[in-house]
Amino acid sequence: MSSPDAKDSHRQRKTVVTIEDLCKSYMLGHMELPVLKGLDLSFYEGEYVSIMGPSGSGKSTLLNILGCLDKPTSGRYLLGTDDVSTLDDNQLSAIRGKRIGFVFQSFNLIRQLNILENIEVAMYYQHVPKHQRRQRATMLAERVGLGDRIRHRPFELSGGQQQRVAIARALANDPLIILADEPTGNLDSQSGAEILEILNELNAQGKTIIVVTHDEQISSQTHRSVHLLDGQIERIQSNGTGE
């Protein structure tokens, strides 16, 4: 479990995510399948947290709820000061666009758009004026080391470069939290290390990052690791990386 020192440091920091008695079940025919079973957990501003556990432990379900892609069956989810656990689909979509940045294992870039346009997409849906979108997308492309590739399309880039674009896109609307789902899962070791370095730098600059991973090397670089087992929190450990 987290050390007393870590708990003291958390008390001094703003809470950006709180889940209380969070449960999620799915119906299989007439049978209810519980996936998350009463989770209580908080994440703090500027924190870097990994969520770990074996297949079927509830990692992806938890990430989908944190990302407002799914709704809990019961319990509360506070994102900042907003209780999003009771919002409808349209309200959840609005929250996703403004307050959450996603980095997926499969990149999820739009093949028909170039790099600059892929980064701009998130801002387009928030009605950011075109000249502002273009300016910020260019800045973000440069921030992830792709300033010279902005006119290329995703299929012209390596996997590591595509994930850099995905990170830039996740930053487009200056989100409250960044959620990363196995961000190095489709990359070779060198590209994976480069992506982790970018995430580490973003966290050092104050971004709150929550990453789902099965990789102990990734987990060891985060402040805390939340280990799930059978839909419950098995343990939370401090990794001694600055928290």
Image (cartoon, helix red, strand yellow):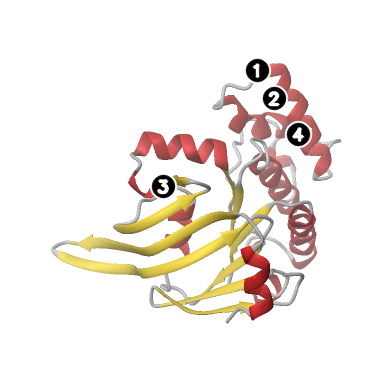
Give amino acid for label 4.
Answer: His
Residue 172 percent location from the top left of the image:
67, 36
CA distance separating discs 3 and 1: 29 Å
Percent x, y of residue 111: 61, 36
Separation of disc 2 and disc 4 at Cα? 18 Å
211 in relation to 110, above or below: below
Q: Which mark is residue 152?
A: 4
Q: Which secondary structure lies at badge 2? A: helix
Badge 2 or badge 4: first in the primary sequence:
2
Amino acid carrying mark 2 in the image: Arg
Residue bearing the label numbered 1:
129
**Cα–Cα gap, marks 4 and 3:** 40 Å
Mark 3 neighbour density, 10 Å: few (under 14) some (14–19) many (20 or more): some
For the residue labelled by badge 3, is the local secondary structure a helix, a strand or a loop?
strand
Tell me the distance, in whole angstroms, between the alpha carbons under discs 4 and 1. Answer: 23 Å
Residue 151 drawn above or below residue 72: above
Q: Tell us which disc is closer to us: 4 or 1.
A: 1
Answer yes or no: is residue 151 visible: no
> In the rendered structure, which amino acid carries the disc numbered 1?
Pro
The answer to whether mark 1 and mark 2 are in CB contact below 8 A is yes
User: What residue did someone put label 2 on?
Assistant: 133
Q: Which numbered disc, 4 or 1, marks the residue that appears first in the sequence?
A: 1
- In the picture, the quarter occupied by the N terminus is bottom right
Q: Helix or strand or loop: what does disc 4 sit on?
A: loop
C-alpha separation, residue under disc 3 versus residue under disc 2: 29 Å
Q: Residue at x 72, y 31 (%)?
A: 116
Front-lying residue, 78 or 186: 78
| 65 relative to 115 in the view: left or right | left
Q: Residue at x 37, y 56 (%)?
A: 76
Q: Residue at position x 78%, y 33% from top?
A: 150
Disc 3 designates what residue?
83
